[in-house]
Amino acid sequence: MSDANKPSDEEETDKGEQSAAVNSARRFTYYLIALALVIWFYTLWADRVTPMTSHGRVNGQLIRISPQVSGPISSISVVNNAEVKRNQALLAIEKSPFQLNVESARLALQQASQSVNADSAAVDAAKATQVAARVKLANAKQHAERNTTLARRGVVSQATLDDSLSALNTARANLAEATAAFARAQEALGPKGENNPQVKSALNKLDQALLDLSYTDINAPAAGVITNINLTAGDYAATGHPLLTYINNNHFWLTAMVRENSLVYIQKGTIVKIVFDAYPGEIFHGEVTSIGWGSSGNGSLQIDGNNGLFDSPAGIQHAQRFPVNVRFFDIPDDVNLRYGGLATVSFYPSQSEFGEALLDLWTWIWSYLSYVS
């Protein structure tokens, strides 16, 4: 071979460099593929052993307060987003028509009593006391039922529940006493008055009139916050139509929508770590109190009006998400949770120390990333 046909040293060097570059690129591609496979297998494994979800929201007792009688609003005693105490006055409906109904019922009772030569004053007073006791019992029962529900979720103490149950028993005793006093007042009317149909009808009308009058005062069901007020004095309040919203801001819990693939090892008592978007760098703790048995869509934490279950999307097939309720361990006083606040939840079902160590690292990183995302 002539010298002209021999490859030069520079050409051989270029070919060698190109071959090395190709090999290097090939190795880098293999590394990327291997890394992607490792990450993929890790996510599959971690999704079951150390699950994590960003579909968490602060939950609590929310009551849409509706009037039980209709009429124009005469006064509003709270401002929007104000904190209130239990039984604090919120608003009042114009009382005049209901007071007239009470007076009319009392006159009818007097007329019926006079027809049998009986005095209705004592039975009138006893009936008013009985109705007031019945209203207080209804309020005490609702309060006790709310605390019972919260106690089951683990967000109120046993002492708080015991206090509400004690108040319920006291209200029952007061109603029993008022009912006995009313029975004695009826007996004082005499046989003709006690069994007279007109007297009984008048008493029933007085009972309903007094009850309706008591409904004109709308009070806070418990300590909390009143929000969503778009009212002014003179607005008409219709029976059953919500006027404002009450939120119990003293007892919150967390509802996390978790993919069904991740529920394998989660159970009641599973420890969780929680990151709130509003508190970067801070990690809070809690435990699972219950796992939902139903879901209907996309994990949006919205309720399906047809079946009352949490929405989990229609259309494209997605993994279903189910609600997992979590109670908090250590929420400091300076942390102000708000109903509907977003949270990321990490679950620690004690299946892998290595996996939980990695989850700790990722939770810490996410506590900062969630704030800027």
Image: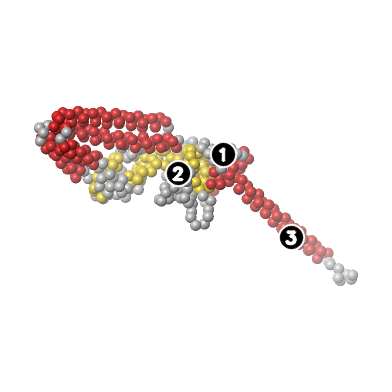
Name the residue type under label 2.
Answer: Val
Secondary structure at badge 1 equals loop
Count of numbered circles in the view = 3
Disc 3 + disc 1, Cβ < 8 Å: no
Label 3–label 2 contact, CB within 8 A = no
Mark number, residue 349: 1
Query: Label 2: which residue?
Result: 58
The residue at the point 63 percent across, 47 percent down is 42
Residue position marked by numbered label 3 in the rendering: 22
Report how far apart the C-alphas of labels 3 and 1 lie in the structure: 46 Å
Task: For marks 1 and 2, give the one nearer the viewer.
Answer: 1
Amino acid at the residue labelled 1: Pro
Name which residue lies at 35% across and 48% down.
Answer: 228
Q: Is residue 138 visible?
A: yes
Q: Quadrant of residue 75?
A: top left
Marked residue nearer the N-terminal end (3 or 2): 3
Query: Does the image show residue 368?
Result: no
Task: Determine the CA span between mark 3 and mark 2.
Answer: 54 Å
Residue at image location 38% in from the left, 37% down from the top: 146
Question: x, y (%) of residue 78?
Answer: 30, 43
Alpha-carbon neighbours of circle 3 within 10 Å: few (<14), some, or many (≥20)?
Answer: few
Q: Secondary structure at mark 2?
A: strand
